[in-house]
Image (spheres, coloured by chain):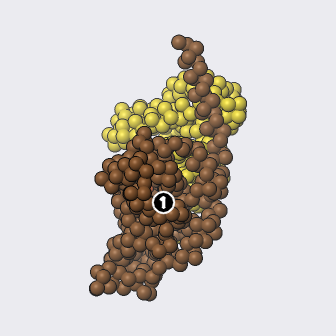
Chain colours: A brown, B yellow
Amino acid sequence: MYAQMVKSTGHGVKPLDEMDPQERAFQERIDAGDKIEPKDWMPDGYRKNLIRQIGQHAHSEIVGQLPEGNWITRAPTLERKAILLAKVQDEAGHGLYLYCAAETLGVSRDELTRMLLDGKMKYSSIFNYPTLTWADMGAVGWLVDGAAIMNQVPLQRTSYGPYARAMVRICKEESFHQRQGFDIMMKMANGTDAQKKMAQDALNRFWFPSLMMFGPSDKDSVHSAQSMAWRIKMNTNDELRQKFVDQTVPQAEYLGLTVPDPDLRWNDETGQYDFSEPNWDEFFDVISGNGPCNTERLNTRKQAWDDGAWVRDGMLAHAAKRKSQGIAAQ
Amino acid sequence: MSDGLFQFLLRMGDNTLVLGHRISEWCGQAPGLEEDIALANTALDLIGQTQMWLGYAAEVEGAGRTADDLAFLRDVWDFRNLLMLERPNLDFGHTITRQFFFDAFHVLLLTRLQASSDARVAEIAAKSVKEAAYHLERSADLVIALGDGTDESHQRMQSAVDLLWPFAGEMFAADDVDNAMAAAGIAPDPASLRAEWQRKVDQVMADATLTLPESQFAHQGGKTGRQHTEHLGHMLAQMQWLQRAYPGATW
Ligand SMILES: [Fe+2]
Ligand SMILES: [Fe+2]
């Protein structure tokens, strides 16, 4: 979801008895619940998929700073400003953990950044939606971080050690993110008429994009089987989406807000909610670059990178001078 | 005395509020991930300090206002921050040079305020001084690294120093409020901090291969509120917009 996989690896899962001995031993370790560590042998496909997934997840944390960063300077109280700053700072930290995890697979942070800026790697579709009112800070924390938690909690048990450990650190911080979002929504939903209207409008705009965060429907998500066999994906997209809906709908009711889905209803037989699928055409538009904010988000990142070049170069040059002075002094 | 104390507390809180706001504008746009995190952290510290200073200011005023009322419902002429801090960020070099000039001053001031005759002032200073010392360590290191980095980084840092130097003097200019605070043992005379500040700055400039301008001219009017720059109004338009647009709402 933060790692919203849509491309297929092109082939199904190989049965154990068709694997060569090395590959088979690898799969058996995964099946036994072992953690794969950076120095261990791993199939190329496993490495490539992980780089794509962790990289995409890291980029999402970084680009994800922007829609919330959009409101830091307009936060309505000092306390809200401080909380939002702390939250957005956490997201940058998550990006850092994840880039470090990706680096253990032999790809540098700069290379990954280049691929993001060149449009060769993606980030979660959700961050291509605008944040238009303060209630959006509530909706993002409540729904977007809520969906992120849904995906990240199981990933703490993923097969790749550094990724699993990054997830453990990240999950510790995520519950605060969701809580502060829900708290903003509570204040708005119990506030003035204008605040209630803002809260409902935020839910209207963020509901379906949040459901899209889990990726396409299982029937259109061909690569899932291999990723699940490798335990770099722990649940199917539809399972997680259902879980998210089941958890979130009662919260919306508690807030006195209406989920913008006329077909949403509790199903006694299945013991879960029936709900409408998001508009998948819109989803594919957004991930192919045509979301409301794609150009802006990427341009902001590009500009930050380009404007920062002299700083990064300056720091490197200084460090090199220091090092050579150190050597000369010895 | 209580009006003098109120003014002094506004100066402390407005400095951290206005600089915290400026620094927070970097969110998601810094030259690298580590800088992004560090800047957000600095902004967060400064906003936390603002809550303490303006919270105490509101108590001292005794008019039923809160720290938020002071931050979000005063207009430009009632702000008491240094002019330097409301200036736009410009490039990273300008942002960091300003941070360094202020941090070096802030650490000295907070250190002295720990011995304030006003227990609350001493307490807030004690809570803030460690954060400020950390900010100073970082900003000084960055000024040195970028001053002594590439030709381009050196040249950018030198122009930041040239641009900001005329705004540094305001930190040390004493007026009636400062004199009253000094007489009551609440705060040091700011002029008494100058020599030590200058020593620190000279040392960092030397390591950074940067030169301070010779002029001693100092722009003034921020801490007295007499005449702010045009930039502050734009900042407040953004910062205060929600509170102004939806009066009486709680958030
Ligand atoms: Fe995160
Ligand atoms: Fe988060």
At x 36%, y 85%, the residue is A265
Q: State which quadrant residue A15 falls in.
A: bottom left
Judging depth in this view, the residue of A146 and B203 nearest the camera is A146
At x 63%, y 33%, the residue is A314
Judging depth in this view, the residue of A222 and B84 nearest the camera is A222
Asked whether residue B136 appears in the rendered view, the answer is yes
Quadrant of the snapshot with the N terminus of chain B: top left
At x 44%, y 47%, the residue is A42
At x 58%, y 71%, the residue is A284
Compared to residue B73, the image places residue B101 above or below, namely: above
Q: Secondary structure at mark 1?
A: loop
Judging depth in this view, the residue of B217 and A61 nearest the camera is A61
Q: Position of residue A54 (x, y in %)?
A: 48, 53
Q: Position of residue B207 (x, y in %)?
A: 59, 23
Circle 1 residues within 10 Å: few <14, some 14–19, many ≥20: many
Asked whether residue B74 appears in the rendered view, the answer is no
Judging depth in this view, the residue of B163 and B244 nearest the camera is B163
Q: Would residue B140 appear left or right of A257 to someone viewing this image?
A: right
Compared to residue A70, the image places residue A212 above or below, namely: below
**Kind of residue sitting beneath label 1:** Ala
Compared to residue A208, the image places residue B136 above or below, namely: above
Q: Position of residue A227 (x, y in %)?
A: 44, 60
Q: Position of residue B160 (x, y in %)?
A: 66, 37
Q: Subunit of mark 1?
A: A
Q: Would residue A192 appear left or right of A330 to someone viewing this image?
A: left
Which residue is tagged 1?
A3
Quadrant of the snapshot with the C terminus of chain B: bottom left
